[in-house]
Image (tube, helix red, strand yellow):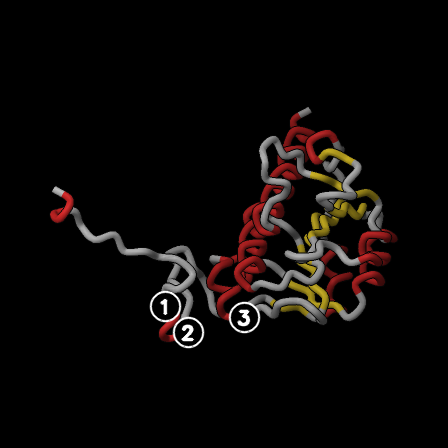
Amino acid sequence: MADEKKQFQKRGSNFGRSNNQSRMNRHASGTKALIKEESELDDLLDQVQEPLVLILDCVQDPHNLGACLRSANGVGVDAVIIPKDKSAPVTDTAIAVSCGGATHTPIFRVTNLVRTMDALKKRGIWIAGTSDHQGTQDLYETDLSGPLALVMGSEAKGMRRLTTENCDFLLSIPMAGFVECLNVSVATGVCLFEIVRQRKAKQNN
């Protein structure tokens, strides 16, 4: 009988809004983000043979930032780089959504992203940008097994012009349906796990 069915409780973005807190995640771990000084990036990279770096170019939403940090930690990213300006701060919400990613992955907030990208290039790290419309190389057909920095753009506009111009190449994720693109946090996970898949395949050969 319809009147005997249990009432469905809707849970979504409004959940917990009354006390301005995000929904508790049972996987959440830690309360303080692992924010590093910009000057410490070189020392960290000196200790890594084949670095994997994630660059988030002006991601605006703290939920997306937290989800990106969760994926970054899940694949073993060595460092996450975020511009100091025009980017979401690593808030309590971002930390909670990251489920430990923000507290266990070094995060560097840099003053000049292009300068940082140039420094990575001098270390022999390739810069792979992502673009829904300008990407010229298929994610799954590009060799991503070496030292690499993956750049993800903002939710609305993607990567900024100077960021795009300073990438070595631009990747696109092939889409098979009506939807033209993925949410930035989902796309980040797709790209990062493809990179790890290629690295493992290379090690096994």
x, y (%) of residue 80? 66, 58
Secondary structure under tag 3 reads: loop
Residue 150 versus residue 164: which sits nearer the camera?
Answer: 164
Q: State the residue position of label 2.
A: 20
Q: State the residue position of label 3.
A: 91
x, y (%) of residue 34? 59, 66
Q: State the residue position of label 1.
A: 16
Residue 156 appears in view: yes
Residue 142 versus residue 174: which sits nearer the camera?
Answer: 174
Q: How crowded is mark 3: few (under 14 residues within 10 Å), some or many (20 or more)?
A: some
Q: Quadrant of residue 120?
A: bottom right
**In the orientation shown, which residue stands out farthest toward the bottom?**
19
First along the sequence among labels 3 and 2: 2
Amino acid carrying mark 2 in the image: Asn
Q: Name the residue at 75% across, 33% down.
A: 142
Secondary structure under tag 2 reads: loop
